[in-house]
Image: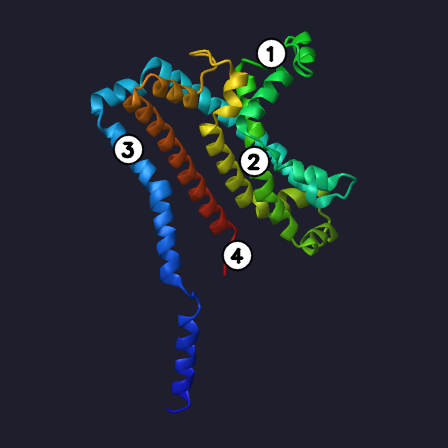
Amino acid sequence: MNASAPARQGTGARQRSVLPGFSLAMGITLGYVGLVVLLPLAALSWRAAGLGLDDFWRIVSGPRAVASYLLTLRAAFFATILTVLYGLLMAWVLVRYRFPGRRLVDAAMDLPFALPTAVAGIALTALYAKNGWLGQPLADLGISVAYTQVGVSIAMAFVSVPFVVRTVQPVLEDLDPEVEEAARSLGATDWQVFARVILPAITPALMAGGSLAFARCLGEFGGVIFIAGNLPFKTEITALLIFIRLEEYDYPAAAAIALVVLASALAMLLVINTLQGLNRRWAEPRS
């Protein structure tokens, strides 16, 4: 009886000291989330709610708004596919190979994070314009990039690729090479090792990086407007349409369109998180 009491007291003391300062840390965290995240979103919803249902639907379902939605979603979709493929390739190269300049390439992957998006947009426009380094050879082949939907997708992919690289890279680094060696010893080819051993292990990280990249593409502004040309019904993205409504002092319309973008991003993240949960449940060994 006496021997067990100190043990219980020691256990209780250890349990109480697992998260020291929990109340203070949680209070600061919730305060930050409330001020920086929830309060602006609540203000956005309140501004849009002041329109009324009929006016709200008239604004968000207008021809120009619908055209911007379709363009943004289509460009973000293709940009995300390109980003996932390229990001996986770059993460693989940086983890599995050693070559001169590897650290420089690794550091360059973070350049879109540090580079102002307006600078990125101007650089891409100069590069892909018809008299640019890449734009002129492409124009000779009859391919236009600048001021087209292709340019919009390229700009979105440029600013979002670090999300995939930095999400997949640490997972590849943590993979146990003995598992791959065991698969090869059993007669598996390199492609079978990748498809059945490596790919299932990195799929959650790949989906997480892809979802973050897609969300970034939906809200990208500075990197796109210069190369897009901003032609209504052709290359006008939703973020630019929101900015135009703000310039016209039509704040309720801007809030209504922004709310549609927000709902789309949240729905996409919900779907991705659900798929990730199902993937983890499927990957768990069954007893």
Residue identifier under label 2: 113
Q: In which quarter of the image is the N terminus?
A: bottom left
Three-letter amino acid code at the position of disc 3: Ser
Three-letter amino acid code at the position of disc 4: Pro
Residue identifier under label 1: 144
Residue identifier under label 4: 285
- Mark 1–mark 3 Cα distance, whole angstroms, equals 39 Å
Secondary-structure class at tag 3: helix
Residue identifier under label 3: 45
The answer to whether the residues at label 3 and label 2 have Cβ atoms under 8 Å apart is no
- Mark 2–mark 4 Cα distance, whole angstroms, equals 38 Å
Q: Earlier in the sequence, mark 2 or mark 4?
A: 2
Left/right placement of residue 115 relative to residue 60 reads right
Vertical arrangement, residue 166 with respect to residue 116, above or below: below
Secondary-structure class at tag 4: loop
- Mark 1–mark 2 Cα distance, whole angstroms, equals 27 Å
The answer to whether the residues at label 4 and label 1 have Cβ atoms under 8 Å apart is no
Q: Earlier in the sequence, mark 4 or mark 1?
A: 1
